[in-house]
Image (spheres, helix red, strand yellow):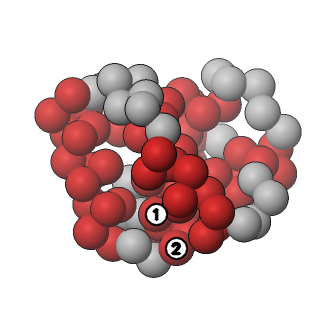
Amino acid sequence: MLGDYGSAGVWIGKAKLSANPIYHVIAAAIYGQLGRREEAEAERQWFAKAAPEILTELPKVIRMRSIKPKDEAHLLDGLAKAGLVSLESVKQQG
């Protein structure tokens, strides 16, 4: 949320929370913001196998977390850059 994607990329790699779907949401957003396409694709594949239902409703899942609208938009932007959501679908889901 602070825009320090380099540090975020380092720390997400050290986190040991890979069973938690929210970890993968955050990781994908970070990788999207960093332009690290291979890692972002690995996160997309994780969702496709482990939690495909989250991918179809990702904006809704994020909104359920009660984060600030600015932070939500920032997170969704990273996910769009990672190829997990389209900004058009986010706008449609309101």
In the image, residue 9 sits, relative to residue 75, either above or below, namely: below
Q: Which mark is residue 34?
A: 2
Can I make out residue 8 in this image?
yes
Of residue 66 and residue 43, the one placed in the foreground of this image is 43
Residue neighbourhood size for the residue with mark 1, other residues' Cα within 10 Å, grouped as few (<14), some (14–19), many (≥20): many
User: Pointers 2 and 1 in contact (CB under 8 A)?
Assistant: yes
At x 42%, y 32%, the residue is 16
For residue 31, the mark is 1
Residue at horizontal 63%, vertical 52%? 75
Q: Is residue 42 left or right of residue 26?
A: left
The residue under the point 27% across, 69% down is 38
Q: Is residue 58 left or right of residue 39?
A: right
Look at the picture and state if 52 lies above or below 90: above
Q: Amino acid at mark 1?
A: Tyr
* Residue closest to the far bottom: 35
Q: Is residue 76 above or below residue 56?
A: below
Mark 1: secondary structure: helix
Q: Position of residue 62 (x, y in %)?
A: 60, 33
- Secondary structure beneath dot 2 equals helix
Q: Residue at x 66, y 31 (%)?
A: 63
Type of amino acid under label 2: Leu
Residue 82 located left or right of residue 65:
left
Question: In the image shown, does 52 or 50 lie closer to the viewer?
Answer: 50
